[in-house]
Image (cartoon, grey):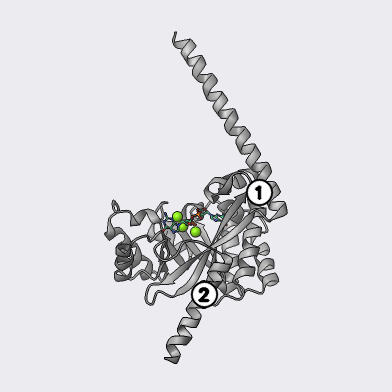
Amino acid sequence: QAKVKGGQQFQIFSEDMSRHLVERQQLETELRCALENGNELELFFQPIYASEDLRITSVESLVRWNHPRRGLVTPLEFIPIAEETGLIGKLGEWVLREACRAAKDWSIETIAVNVSPIQLSQPGFPEMVFDVLLESGLSPQKLEIEITETALLDSSNTTSKRALKALRDAGVRIALDDFGTGYSSLNNLIALQVDFVKIDRSFLQPTSSRSVIWAIINMSHAIGLEVTAEGVETEDQKEFLIAVGCDHIQGYLLSKPLPEASFTALLEEQISGVKDSAAA
Ligand code: C2E
Ligand code: MG
Ligand code: MG
Ligand code: MG
């Protein structure tokens, strides 16, 4: 009896598995196509605000896939596939090129681009970044690379470490993304030599203690890092973050990720707002 049941379970499991595999394979083929044509992928831009005056000082680029049949596919669904199939190099290069081109004429301090740990560890990554910077005319100081904490702590990877050093030496800023979800010790944080820390959205949940946010901000400031809080959704969270000295805030409360034209318009509004108040 148990054997029969076990056998059936195995069958169901394997049907499920193969469906899953077929689905993935199809997504992979379609992603490959999308990368070749380039017209289904789109970058969105989410403003990052200075806490002191709530002006836009930076922006994070977030990739979207407008799939003809599936609709909008989120990066959480296709970045892992790109990483597993080796497409991440090409995808990451496309994202970087688009972001640098778009940001060239924006009056902001930095444009942030997410980089997969797998891409960071590929030989030739910093050279590719320098090529794109030259080609776009964006200054290296204006580019900020976001890398997740777990990726940076993979200290066994010397290629990634060397890549980060080469980028830093050229003036590119490095941000530690999703901070608090990995296992960074204070020592690690100092050794990593990042410029910014982005506190993970999970710390803003009501179940999370606010003294933890307070501690992260003060610890980061003590070692010379600027702090951004991501995922700010309520007025209350915003007021708290400003009160405890968080340098930058980002989240749906202030703005969702926007298409390029909408973000450009928002920046222009901000600039003309300044002119108006100067004239008044
Ligand atoms: P992330 O880098 O931590 O980006 C923040 C994510 O939180 C984005 O999701 C953003 O849309 C979302 N978000 C921003 N504000 C709020 C908020 O107030 N509330 C909530 N609930 N969410 C908010 P998205 O765009 O779906 O991206 C998810 C993740 O995919 C990113 O997390 C990043 O790790 C990865 N990703 C996105 N674009 C790229 C890319 O171009 N390259 C690579 N390698 N990874 C990317
Ligand atoms: Mg990010
Ligand atoms: Mg993040
Ligand atoms: Mg996050």
Tags 2 and 1 touching, CB below 8 Å? no
Q: Nearer the viewer, mark 2 or mark 1?
A: 2
How many marks overall?
Answer: 2
Q: Residue at x 29, y 66 (%)?
A: 240
- Tell me the CA gap for discs 2 and 1: 33 Å
Q: Is residue 152 left or right of residue 239?
A: right
The relative height of residue 70 versus residue 128 in the rendered view (above or below) is above
Q: Which residue is mark 2?
A: 267
Q: Amino acid at mark 1?
A: Leu
Q: Residue at x 38, y 77 (%)?
A: 53
> Considering the numbered disc 1 on the image, is that residue within a helix, a strand or a loop?
loop
Mark 1 CB near ligand 1 (8 Å cut): no
Inspect this view and state whether residue 2 appears: yes
Residue 189 picture location, percent across and down: 43, 61
Q: Which residue is mark 1?
A: 87
Q: Amino acid at mark 2?
A: Leu
Residue 95 or 192: which is nearer the viewer?
95
The quadrant of the rendering that contains the N terminus is: top left
Q: Is residue 248 left or right of residue 41?
A: left
The relative height of residue 141 versus residue 280 in the rendered view (above or below) is above
